[in-house]
Image (cartoon, grey):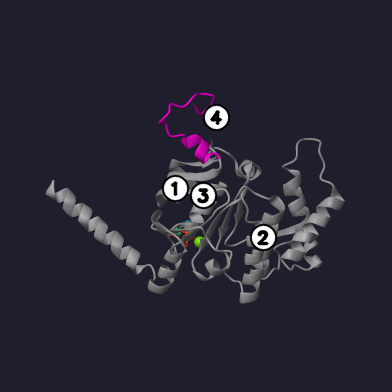
Amino acid sequence: MRRHPSGRYLAYNETDQTTESMSSLVIKDLHATVDGQEILRGLTLEVEKGKVHAIMGPNGSGKSTLSKVIGGHPDYTVTSGEVLLDGENILEMEPDERARKGIFLAFQYPMEIPGVSNANFIRAALQARLPEGEELEATEYYAHLYEKMDMLEMPRAFTARSVNEGFSGGEKKRNEILQMAMLEPKYAILDETDSGLDIDALRIVSAGVNSLRGKDLGILLITHYQRLLNYIQPDVVHVLVHGRIVRTGGPELALQLEEEGYDFIREEIEQNANAAALGAGAL
Ligand code: ADP
Ligand code: MG
């Protein structure tokens, strides 16, 4: 007989869902508002470690809202639903605690932090995760940092510059991936990491993300365009429309969206709604 993590023995035919979700980021029927307006309307999604899930969707469908809600941004209010990290509810946690638990967000519009050097910023983030009294070893830290910067083809001067201040759009996106490479999260949510990148930068950033792929990392890749998915091959593609996942498929779904736009999905949703209304009328 299998044993549940709680110590309880499972009945022979009982589904052991907890064990399953112990290595995934589970978003269950999530509803969230901003400024009193509901943006996420029952979003359900599971990102397993070792997998790359892409979310595509039209402008304003709630993609960035989802990433901010997972990160714990104070402007966004969760009205119902759950977000479980390896089985643990993170919605009650402060943003920094979520980060220490292994959530990483790469923002669509990365913030500038004047007066804080890039190297010190990442160092402070790493230091914050160490147990009390333990110090990050400086030589090792810089060796690690330079290795990741080389991978992302970032000149050394970027260590001393203030975080994102005066960075071009592409440099900011590269810097987000540098932070991700250094912080080694369990789950990374990358919000339109491809926007503002020229083709060379796109290739470098994608190679960086691909080099971080592995069995201990789950990635949620938010993008408006299929192009990124040529470089970072997703395992699963979801379509987000009006605050809900309306379709899930493989990489071919992204190609179909690229060709046909979002209209065919919108039409399907309308037809389903009409059919449901007719069905209800017949009762
Ligand atoms: P996407 O990333 O899919 O383009 P967003 O999540 O950014 O969409 O936005 C979804 C909707 O929520 C939009 O209508 C947007 O105007 C609104 N919204 C998002 N953030 C805020 C905010 N901080 N204040 C007011 N409205 C917001
Ligand atoms: Mg967005």
The answer to whether mark 2 is within 8 Å of ligand 2 is no
Q: Which mark is residue 5?
A: 4
Q: Residues within 10 Å of mark 2 (few under 14, many from 20)?
A: few
Rendering quarter of residue 265: bottom left
**Left or right of 154 in this view: 194:** left
Q: CA distance from mark 4 to mark 2?
A: 32 Å
Q: Which mark is residue 211?
A: 2
Q: Nearer the viewer, mark 3 or mark 1?
A: 3
Q: Are marks 2 and 3 in contact (CB under 8 Å)?
A: no
Give the amino acid type for the residue marked by disc 2 in the picture: Ser
Task: Identify the magenta region.
Answer: 1-22
**Spot occupied by residue 152 in the image (x, y as percentages of width and height):** 71, 65
Q: Residues within 10 Å of mark 3 (few under 14, many from 20)?
A: many
Q: Residues within 10 Å of mark 4 (few under 14, many from 20)?
A: few
Q: How many marks?
A: 4
Q: Which mark is residue 32?
A: 1
Dot 2 falls on a residue whose secondary structure is helix
Q: Are marks 1 and 4 in contact (CB under 8 Å)?
A: no
Q: CA distance from mark 4 to mark 3?
A: 20 Å
Q: Earlier in the sequence, mark 4 or mark 3?
A: 4
Q: Is residue 19 magenta?
A: yes
**Left or right of 132 in this view: 101:** left
- Considering every residue shown, the one lying at the far bottom of the view is 199
Rendering quarter of residue 127: top right
Give the amino acid type for the residue marked by disc 4 in the picture: Pro
